[in-house]
Structures are given as structure tokens and as C-alpha cells.
Image (spheres, rainbow, N blue to C red):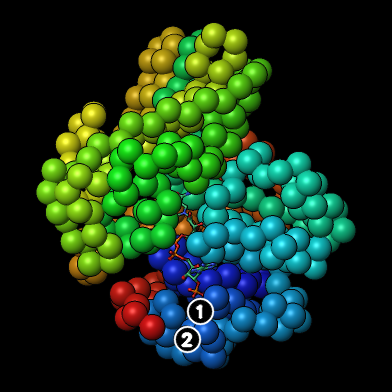
């Protein structure tokens, strides 16, 4: 069965998702939502580097997208919007998202209820994933399956994110700001709260009863200026952020999920970078792995950040058939069977960097 899919925005993650939708026989692109007015009316192929026109033009008219009767939407906006999610879900569109959603636990009670009710009305499902959180949670859960006893889990994204061109996201995480800014730790906690959702998901998956979630963060000031093109990190401003959201059961810190990020050439993080996702399970036995996302032989884009974007997009886009088949409501990584990719087709479009619109 071919599933009808709408791609919601075509930024760093969205255009990789769009490319993947076009490359799959079991998915049919029936619409593209554009936030930026400059993208409206452009062919999907142009927005994601697909070699031939698709005939599907980007629109900001949600009613038009719904008239195409999509089965699913790959929802990858910079900032998620509950009204948009409700509109999609109550129209019967299953939502797979990378946008700050793992369980919906950080939503207000009212917003979570609105989403659940929209799912009931539309008989639809919402699912969130990504690389981290997302794939890291799945691998962490799998590793615990090797343990007789789990004492704790720690998952840390340990990377230089200088080439992740999302200035708004980076500023929201504190980069380039005065480390002594009042309320900075709290604002980073809020902005990264999806990692708290992921910590609670993992803790519950291994049978812990979580009674609280805490957050700690350490800022490192850059010792020199860095111009990253899309933003600058002046000396003395935040060039490194290491933080963890921690799920507790009594005095036991059962799961910690967080990041050790630097940006620019002049920051020494509190812990050496591992250039990947470090997944550690402590128990009987201890288990540890580091996920590295590496270029295939035919990778021809400048730099490697594009690989990270594919890695983030695919756990969401590949989930479409599973989410369409799932019961209505909120489903998580702990509910779905393992989500696989697809074997390469003999002829497929090659993704080239999309020129700035
Ligand atoms: N779980 C993970 O591993 C992970 C990793 C990275 C990112 N993410 C999340 O994935 C989502 C997409 O990330 P990204 O790097 O692709 O973001 P991005 O490229 O910075 O932005 C995505 C798109 O959002 C739209 N947009 C821009 N400004 C907006 C605004 N002020 N309000 C609403 N929409 C706006 C634009 O749509 P048009 O293209 O239509 O103009 C843009 O292309 C984000 O929510 C991010 O937090 C998750």
C-alpha cells in the first residue's frame, strides 16, 4: 500500500525527510508546507535537491494540504505549534515529528489533552523521534536488554555543533551569550526539555517509578572569537554547554539524558568530546556504545553536517508506516516495533546541498 505523505517545512531536517519520501516506493508525496514565503510555489524537487520536478508545489495553505487527504505528515518545523498539530491530527493525518516531541510530557496538561482529543476525533496518531533524542533512546533501551540489573543510564550527545546552521536553536541553547546572563540555565532547561521527556521514557521503559526530574548545566566561555558564518561566538561568550536532564526514583538517578556541545574553535569542554552519541548503561553488566554517523564512499557534500541531518530525519520519516498502523493517540519509541530503513533502490536521486532560497 502506498501512503500519502505531506512534508511540513524544508529546513535542515525537513529537506532530508522530503528527499527520503521521494525516494521511497511505498510513500507518495502529496504536499509540502512552507513557512517561508520565498518557498511557496516552488517545486518540492527544488527544495530538497531531487533531480527531476515532482509537480508538487510548496504551499502555506493548510486547507489545500488537507484536501490532498494525506495519511501522514513528516512535521519538522523549527518550533512546533500545538494548533498546527491539532489541525493535522483532527483531520486524520498521522504525525511523525522531530520537533521537540518524544512523549508530549513537557506540554501543558491542556495542550496534551487537546492533542489527545484531536487524535481521538481524527483516529490519528502522533509520534516523535530524531537522532538525539530518538535513535539514542531506542539503542539505550535495546542495551538494557542485555542486563540482569540496570542501576542507571547516561546518554550524552558529545559533539562540536558549529556546522549545525540553526542560529535560533543555538542561541536558545545559550551559545554566543554572556555566561552570567540571569536565567540562562533555566532558559536552556526549558529549550532542551525534550531530553527530560526522553529520560522519563527510558526510566519508565526499565520499570522505574520516576518521582522527579532535575536539570544541571555548565557553561564554558570561549577564549577567542569564532565566526561560523551563520552566527558568531565572541570571546567570553558561551562556546560550550554541557547539561543533563535527570530522572530520579527516590535517591537513585535512574536515567540522565543530555549534551556536551561546543561551538567554534576556542572552547575546551568540561569533558573531552567523543564526536558521537555516548550511550552508557550501568548495571550487570555495564554496557557502552558510541554512535558515530559516518560518510558513505559516495558522500559528496562539503562537510559532514548533512549526515547528521539525515540521521535526525530518518528515525522520523522511516516511522511513517508504523505510525499509520498504530492505534490512535500518542505513541512513543517504547510502543512501536523497531523502525527500519529501506534497501536502496537501483536508481535514486542524489541529494545536493540546496542553495539558500
Ligand atoms: N531529535 C533530534 O535529534 C533533533 C536534532 C536536530 C533538530 N531537531 C528538531 O527538528 C526540528 C527542525 O530542525 P531544523 O534544524 O530543520 O530547523 P531549521 O532548519 O532551523 O528550521 C526548520 C524550518 O522551520 C521553519 N521556520 C523557520 N523559522 C520559523 C519560525 N520562526 N516559526 C516557525 N517555523 C519556522 C522554516 O520552514 P520553511 O523551510 O518552510 O521556510 C525552516 O526551514 C526542530 O524542532 C529541531 O529542534 C531534533
Q: Can residue 53 be seen in this view?
A: yes
Which residue is rendered at x = 32% and y = 58% of the image?
A: 164
Residue identifier under label 2: 38
In space, the residues marked 2 and 1 are separated at their CA atoms by 5 Å
In front: 285, or 44? 44
Q: Does the residue labelled 1 lie within 8 Å of ligand 1?
A: yes
Neighbor class of circle 2 (other Cα within 10 Å; few <14, some 14-19, many 20+) is: few
Whether residue 210 is situated above or below residue 299 in the rendered picture: above
Which of the two residues, 320 or 8, is positioned nearer the viewer here?
A: 8
Residue at the extreme right of the image, as rendered: 121
Which corner quadrant holds the C terminus?
A: bottom left
- Asked if 292 appears above or below 34 in the picture, the reply is above
In the picture, which quadrant includes the N terminus? bottom right
Residue 299 percent coordinates (x, y)? 24, 65
Residue at 45% x, 39% y: name it. 183
For image coordinates 58% across by 64% down, the residue present is 74
Residue 89 position within the rendered picture, expressed as x and y whole percent measured from the top left:
76, 61
Q: Is ligand 1 less than 8 Å from the beta carbon at label 2?
A: yes
Instruction: State whether residue 338 appears in this view.
Output: no
Residue to which mark 1 is pinned: 36
User: Residue 150: x percent and y percent?
Assistant: 50, 14
Give me the disc on residue 23. none
Circle 1 crowding by C-alpha within 10 Å: few under 14, some 14–19, many from 20: some
Label pair 2/1, CB-CB below 8 angstroms: yes
Amino acid at each position: 500500500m502506498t501512503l500519502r505523505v505531506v512534508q511540513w517545512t524544508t529546513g535542515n531536517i525537513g529537506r532530508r525527510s522530503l528527499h527520503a519520501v521521494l525516494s521511497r516506493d511505498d510513500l507518495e508525496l502529496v504536499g509540502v508546507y512552507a513557512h517561508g514565503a520565498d518557498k511557496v510555489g516552488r517545486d518540492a524537487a527544488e527544495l530538497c535537491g531531487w533531480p527531476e520536478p515532482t509537480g508538487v508545489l510548496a504551499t502555506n495553505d493548510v486547507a489545500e494540504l488537507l484536501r490532498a487527504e494525506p495519511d501522514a505528515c513528516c512535521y519538522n518545523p523549527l518550533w512546533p505549534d500545538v494548533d498546527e498539530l491539532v489541525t493535522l491530527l483532527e483531520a486524520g493525518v498521522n504525525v511523525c515529528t522531530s520537533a521537540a516531541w518524544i512523549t508530549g510530557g513537557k506540554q501543558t496538561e491542556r495542550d496534551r489533552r487537546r492533542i489527545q482529543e484531536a487524535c481521538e476525533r481524527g483516529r490519528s496518531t502522533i509520534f516523535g523521534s530524531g537522532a538525539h533524542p530518538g535513535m539514542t533512546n531506542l539503542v539505550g533501551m535495546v542495551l538494557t536488554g542485555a542486563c540482569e540489573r540496570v542501576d542507571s543510564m547516561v546518554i550524552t550527545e558529545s559533539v562540536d555543533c558549529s556546522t549545525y546552521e540553526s542560529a535560533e536553536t543555538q542561541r536558545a541553547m545559550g551559545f554566543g551569550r554572556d555566561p552570567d546572563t540571569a536565567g540562562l540555565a533555566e532558559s536552556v532547561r526549558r529549550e532542551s526539555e525534550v531530553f527530560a521527556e526522553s529520560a522519563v521514557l527510558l526510566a519508565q521503559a526499565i520499570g522505574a517509578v520516576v518521582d522527579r526530574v532535575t536539570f544541571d548545566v555548565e557553561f564554558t566561555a570561549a577564549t577567542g572569537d569564532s565566526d561560523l558564518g551563520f552566527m558568531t561566538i565572541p570571546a567570553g561568550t558561551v562556546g560550550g554547554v554541557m547539561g543533563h536532564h535527570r530522572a530520579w526514583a527516590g535517591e537513585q538517578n535512574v536515567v540522565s539524558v543530555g549534551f556536551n556541545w561546543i561551538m567554534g574553535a576556542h572552547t575546551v569542554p568540561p569533558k573531552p568530546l567523543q564526536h558521537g552519541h555516548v550511550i552508557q548503561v550501568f548495571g550487570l553488566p555495564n554496557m557502552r556504545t558510541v554512535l558515530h554517523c559516518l560518510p558513505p564512499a559516495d558522500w559528496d557534500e562539503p562537510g559532514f553536517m548533512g549526515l547528521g541531518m539525515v540521521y535526525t530525519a530518518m528515525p522520523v520519516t522511516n516511522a511513517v508506516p508504523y505510525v499509520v498502523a498504530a492505534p490512535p493517540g500518542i505513541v512513543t519509541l517504547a510502543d512501536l516495533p523497531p523502525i527500519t530503513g529501506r534497501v536502496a533502490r537501483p536508481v535514486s536521486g542524489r541529494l545536493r546541498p540546496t542553495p539558500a532560497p
